[in-house]
Image (cartoon, grey):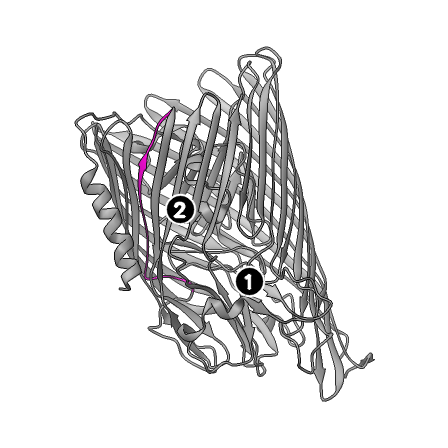
Amino acid sequence: MTKTKKLVFGLSIVCANILFGDETVKLDDVTVSANKIEENIKDVPQSITVIDEEIVQEKGIKTINDVVKEVPNMITNGSNNGVQTSFRGLNLSMFTSNNPVVIYVDGVPYYDRYDFDPSLADVAQVEVLRGPQGTLYGKDAIGAVINIITKTPSNEWHGNIGAEYGNYNYMQSTFNVSGALIENKLFAGINGSFEKDDGWITNHYPGMKSNADEDRERKTSAFLLFKPTDRLSGKLTVTDNYSKINWIDGLNTADTTTPINSIKRDSAKNASFDMPTYEKVKVKSQSLNLSYDFDNVKIESTTTHKNFDADGDFDGDYISGTANDGLRMFDYTNMDTWTQEIKLSGKYNGIKWVAGVYADDEQREIGPFGQEMNMMGSVYVADVYAKPNSKTQAVFGQTMIPLMEKFELTLGGRYQKIKKDIDLTTYQTLDEAAMPGSPFNYKDEKTWNTFLPKVALAYKYSDSLTTYASVSKGYMPGGFNSFAMSGGTEENSFEPQKSTNYEVGMKYTGDNYLLNVSVFRMNIEDIHIYKAISGGTIFLTDNAKKAHSQGIEIDGKYFLTDNIELSGAIGLIDAKYDDYDTGVAVYDGERIENTPRYTANLGIAYVAERGIYGRFDIYARGETNYFDGANNTMVTANGAIISNLKVGYKIEDWDIYGYVKNITNEEYINLLSSSSAGMQRVGFNEPRTFGVGARYKF
């Protein structure tokens, strides 16, 4: 352990020991909607991380990346090609673009890597439901669900505005306002955030913009909530988001022999690339939620429509001074999705239940999608146009049955049918002349039917202590290679990823502290992997036959006094491939890529409604394996410990604060994309950042 890391740990321990008081606070009951009905968190037989609005503001949580750092054994990787999530050994499925964690914002799903960062400007509570959630939440929730619940408006108009400024010319502004147009009947609200920074990397190539990794982002949302009667309500929500992410928070090198831990973030500060490199993402969505309360049953309908465009242009080899100067990669995608869920829920004689039907229709258009490169002095171009579409129909149900005095049995299941098809054409040219076999056409269709059961048993030992055990199935659909250049079904399709999950845990809530512990084991079949063939010129998703992950997750909170709070979480995991043969190398027994050996966070906070407040937090992640395609091996990157500090002052309706993130300027690698074609991209966490901000509530 370095001196810096020892210092950070030492400070946190010293702070925890010297802060003491006799006064205590009583923790309020926390209500969650994990089972699509409102329940006390102590009664839900699964591990859940809850982040309320106060914590969001205290910690400066602005993005899903920030949320993920609060969750044991969950990380996000890289800043290019969308947001890629890993949890308990489950990773992004590259050619479906789906993450193993699904986000819901008031019932609107976010799962695609290019559309995985909704606004948190109006958040009331974030519930991270750890473990497979397919029974109630559907086809892609094999790892977890991040359930975001927005604020409920009141008759009085309330809101807030805020602004921040930091180094690297970072600027952010937020606003949120809501209230009644017609008292008790019609409510409205609007919120938004605007963010920019110039980045920490300079491009020195003549004629190119010097701020290599500057980012721009806008997120806006508005709603109408109508309650014509005490039983009937409806909510219409529209969102319009835009982001432009330039370059990568890292570097590219043709040197694939340097050990990964010898590549340093300082080497990425100065870049030289000759073609614009960016991703622009535009997302527009609309949702309509209607609900009616009968005496014993509630019926609810949620309809969503979402359209997003992801336009990407990239330097062909991420460097200059090579034969590929002036050449580029490109990826243009449009997706249009409709979803419909009708759900009934109720409670009778202590039995809680929920049941419903679900359908979605996803139409995706990819193209142009490909790359230009120099081939023996000529310009070679591969360009793909594909339409990979998907339709899902499902029925689901779950019931929670009290047994005797202290037991509760949960039985659930989801039967779903997923149909996918693809219509693809690939063009290959050399100096604009068609190459042999071009164009290549590939059409295919597959249907998968599956049943996802769940069984859980909870034992309420006392009002303070609940224990539980659960068994459930996880599922992520298969799909097709959207960059196919030859072959048929066997070469260009992959099967669904399936898992069997076992979990036992306990939840304890005292007057001034809480503690949650869960132990899990997951057996994974046909795990989705991403590999290179033909000398690193063709990339595709395939299935590794078997893998497993097992570990323990602990999180808790302790109030030393009314104002002093300790909180923390740790996840330890052993995740390995059991049967993984790429045809070039065998990786049996290797740790699953993108899965740190551990993640942890620890924080101490002085909270106050008025006057000074502050908090000191550390975030740690352990060694992480990455797949090195250039050398057909797994490599291990070092972990790191990151420390953050925020201090503020609240006076009347104002909150004025300053912050420092990554105080000691620690670094770790969070992305490795390496191929035998001689291009290795390495991504890093952000260097030290600091700034000031103000927030006004009205």
Badge 1 marks a residue whose secondary structure is: loop
Q: Residues within 10 Å of mark 2 (few under 14, many from 20)?
A: many
Q: Position of residue 354 (x, y in %)?
A: 44, 32
Q: Position of residue 585 (x, y in %)?
A: 43, 81
- Residue assigned mark 2: 453
Q: Residue flagged by tag 1: what amino acid is it?
A: Met
Front residue (pair 399, 468): 468
Left or right of residue 550: residue 446: right
Q: CA distance from mark 2 to mark 1?
A: 26 Å
Residue 71 forms part of the magenta stretch = no
Q: Which mark is residue 602?
A: none
| Residue farthest bottom in this picture | 376
* 673 w.r.t. 148: above or below: below
Quadrant that contains the C terminus: top right
Residue 270 at least partly seen: yes
Q: Which label's residue is closer to the chain start, 2 or 1?
A: 1
Residue 598 forms part of the magenta stretch = yes
Q: Which residues are magenta?
A: 594-609
Q: Residue at x 43, y 49 (%)?
A: 661
Q: Are marks 2 and 1 in contact (CB under 8 Å)?
A: no
- Residue assigned mark 1: 94
